[in-house]
């Protein structure tokens, strides 16, 4: 299957952002709905993606090889993880409490990100935290409101920012 330049770029997004959801791709690709994302995936990238047991979108190994992009989360042989994340996720990982600390709410993480000099909308932070929890990077602790903390020690993570 020969891919257009747009399809290759979008496949690179799937590889880099995996595991991901329709909503994350919808925002990145400037689409109007999750259904539009689904149609695109099925129509143009069907051979190169699949949904895992949690219905999250993942790229096949062939997809990563084809576009020459490293997956968004890679497990190293030493047990350390390398994360390649969009801007808001990148900033969230840098400020979210560690695994032995008290978890933080979305608003608390937003304030921490703002203290670090960034100013994303609260909904972007909420979605970033959900996505990081889906990737297994964060642990979600349900209290009165959902709260988050790292699922692994910070020293076991290498975090790289993807270009938006």
Image (spheres, rainbow, N blue to C red):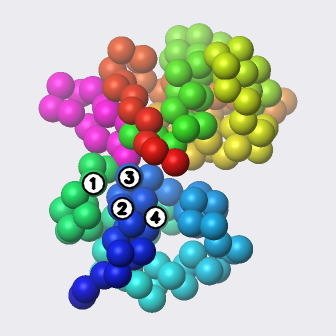
What residue does disc 4 label?
A: 57
Closer-to-camera residue (54/72): 72
Q: CA distance from mark 2 to mark 1?
A: 6 Å
* Residue in view at x 39 percent, y 29 percent: 159
Query: Which callout, 4 or 2, points at the residue further toward the start of the chain?
Result: 2
Query: Which callout, 1 or 4, points at the residue further toward the start of the chain?
Result: 4
* Residue in view at x 35 percent, y 81 percent: 4
Q: Is residue 73 left or right of residue 62?
A: right
Q: What numbered label is drawn on residue 140?
A: none
Query: Which callout, 2 or 1, points at the residue further toward the start of the chain?
Result: 2
The magenta stretch is 72-83
Query: Which callout, 1 or 3, points at the residue further toward the start of the chain?
Result: 3
Q: What numbered label is drawn on residue 12?
A: 2
Residue furthest out toward the top: 101
Res. 50 visible in picture: no
Q: Is residue 99 above or below residue 59?
A: above
* Residue in view at x 48 percent, y 27 percent: 151
Q: CA distance from mark 1 to mark 3?
A: 7 Å
Which quarter of the figure has residue 129? top right
Q: Residues within 10 Å of mark 3 (few under 14, many from 20)?
A: many
* Residue in view at x 77 percent, y 39 percent: 121
Q: What numbered label is drawn on residue 69?
A: 1
Q: Nearer the viewer, mark 4 or mark 2?
A: 2
Image coords of residue 155 (percent x, y): 36, 15
Whether the residues at callouts 2 and 1 have beta carbons within 8 Å, the answer is yes
Q: CA distance from mark 1 to mark 4?
A: 16 Å
Q: Is residue 129 left or right of residue 144?
A: left
The question of residue 136 being in magenta is answered with no
What residue does disc 3 label?
A: 16
Query: Which callout, 4 or 3, points at the residue further toward the start of the chain?
Result: 3
Q: CA distance from mark 4 to mark 2?
A: 13 Å
């Amino acid at each position: 299957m020969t891919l257009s330049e747009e399809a290759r770029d979008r496949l690179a997004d799937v590889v880099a952002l995996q595991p991901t959801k329709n909503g994350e791709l919808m925002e990145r690709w400037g689409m109007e709905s999750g259904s539009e994302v689904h149609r695109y995936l099925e129509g143009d990238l069907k051979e190169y993606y699949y949904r895992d047991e949690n219905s999250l979108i993942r790229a096949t190994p062939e997809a990563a090889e084809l576009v020459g992009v490293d997956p968004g989360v890679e497990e190293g042989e030493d047990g350390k993880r390398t994360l390649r994340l969009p801007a808001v996720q990148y900033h969230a990982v840098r400020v979210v409490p560690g695994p032995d600390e008290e978890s933080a709410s979305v608003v608390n993480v937003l304030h921490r990100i703002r203290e670090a000099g960034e100013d994303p909308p609260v909904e972007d932070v909420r979605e970033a935290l959900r996505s990081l929890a889906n990737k297994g990077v964060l642990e979600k602790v349900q209290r009165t409101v959902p709260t988050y903390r790292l699922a692994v020690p910070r020293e076991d993570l290498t975090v790289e920012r993807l270009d938006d």
